[in-house]
Image: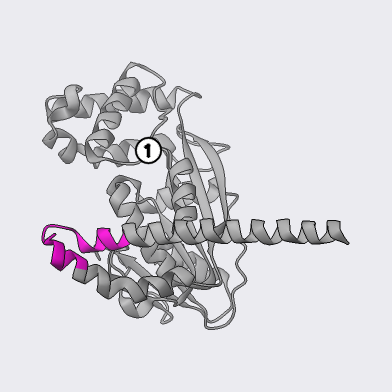
Amino acid sequence: RLSVHHRIITKAFEDRLVLAPVSFKPNDRVLESAAGSGIWALEFNAQNNLPLGIECIDISDKQFPQKYPSNIHFSVQSVTNLPKEWQNSFSFIHQRLLIASMNDSLWIIAINQLFEALIPGGWVELVEIEAKVLAYGSGHCSQRLVSLITSLYKERGIIGDVGVYLPNLLKEVGFIDIHCETRRVPIRRSLNNDGLNRSKHWYDLWMGMKTPILAGGGYGIVKTEVEFDQLLQGCLNEWDESDDANTTYYTIMARKTSHEVVHLLFVMILPWLGALIRTVGLSGVDKTAFQVVVRRLLRRLILKSTSNFLSYLVSQSMIAQGRN
């Protein structure tokens, strides 16, 4: 399933594995987050003649390949808690399809972790899928599936409009040169005889969500496993006969600033934060989340202060020119 989805996404973006304008140098390090089977990293490595060090991480090793080139390394890691020794290590980070596992708090932590892992001037590329405006509903069954998915995402706090949310978050964290490319892909058997059975892929994808959906009570749409299976079979039939059902993919890229004033300030005040938590007695506070919020506020403050200072310099320059 992951292999098919990889091919669908890659084809949607004109067979490009990297959209960000990255210029790799020998011995640069690349990180693939949510690597799964590592298919992106393996193909990326095969396309590049440069000696690059590639780290592939996922929260499970079940999909990891048995054989791979010696310059690629796989490990079980979470993007919300990357190793400290990885700070300022990677020239490029690629991440795909974490939307169903993330809420606002987790996204904030993850994007901050990615920022820290990049070298100054390094690029991050996030590939995600639209989950707010769902265009699967080409018939009665698929409309019911849309209602079910919407309820599931709402209950889990999943951010659906990632095409808007992630660029804004990247900016708040301190990234620059943020750009989002959008592709709408029909959900039907194949396009131009490309051999990609898209409707079956989406059928399999949602079939894999059967257990959590039924555990959630079916969200008023289905009650039993049989009803869920019948619903998905109906969706598959509708998708195969429809040109209307589609899904939207986003590739969002951004560059880390070449200076880290915020990071330096954060390191300076970090001991004070710990003392504050102990003094106030906030024993139940999630320290990581608290630190992320403080870092976010610092970046906003510095960006605002920098903008005001530059505006002041420009105005003074114009005044000086007027006097002359």
Q: Is residue 153 magenta?
A: no
- The residue under the point 12% across, 36% down is 215
Q: Residue 36 occupies which quadrant of the picture?
A: bottom left
Q: Looking at the image, is 134 positioned above or below residue 29? A: above
Left or right of 105, for residue 195: right
Magenta stretch, main secondary structure class: helix
Count up the numbered dots.
1
Q: Residue 214 occupies which quadrant of the picture?
A: top left
Q: Residue furthest right?
A: 324
Q: Nearer the viewer, residue 36 or 161?
A: 161
Q: Looking at the image, is 121 positioned above or below residue 106? A: below
The residue beneath circle 1 is 160
Horizontal and vertical percent for residue 233? 28, 27
Horizontal and vertical percent for residue 66? 31, 72
Q: Nearer the viewer, residue 121 or 199?
A: 121
- The residue under the point 39% across, 76% down is 87
Left or right of 323, for residue 168: left
- The residue under the point 53% across, 59% down is 305
Residue type at mark 1? Answer: Gly
Magenta range is 276-292
> In this rendering, does residue 20 appear at all?
no
Crowding near the residue tagged with mark 1, few <14, some 14–19, many ≥20 C-alpha atoms within 10 Å: many
> In this rendering, does residue 240 appear at all?
yes
Left or right of 153, for residue 250: right
- The residue under the point 28% across, 37% down is 206
Q: Secondary structure at mark 1?
A: loop
Task: Specify the quadrant that holds the C terminus.
Answer: bottom right
Q: Nearer the viewer, residue 51 or 181?
A: 181
Horizontal and vertical percent for residue 259? 53, 72
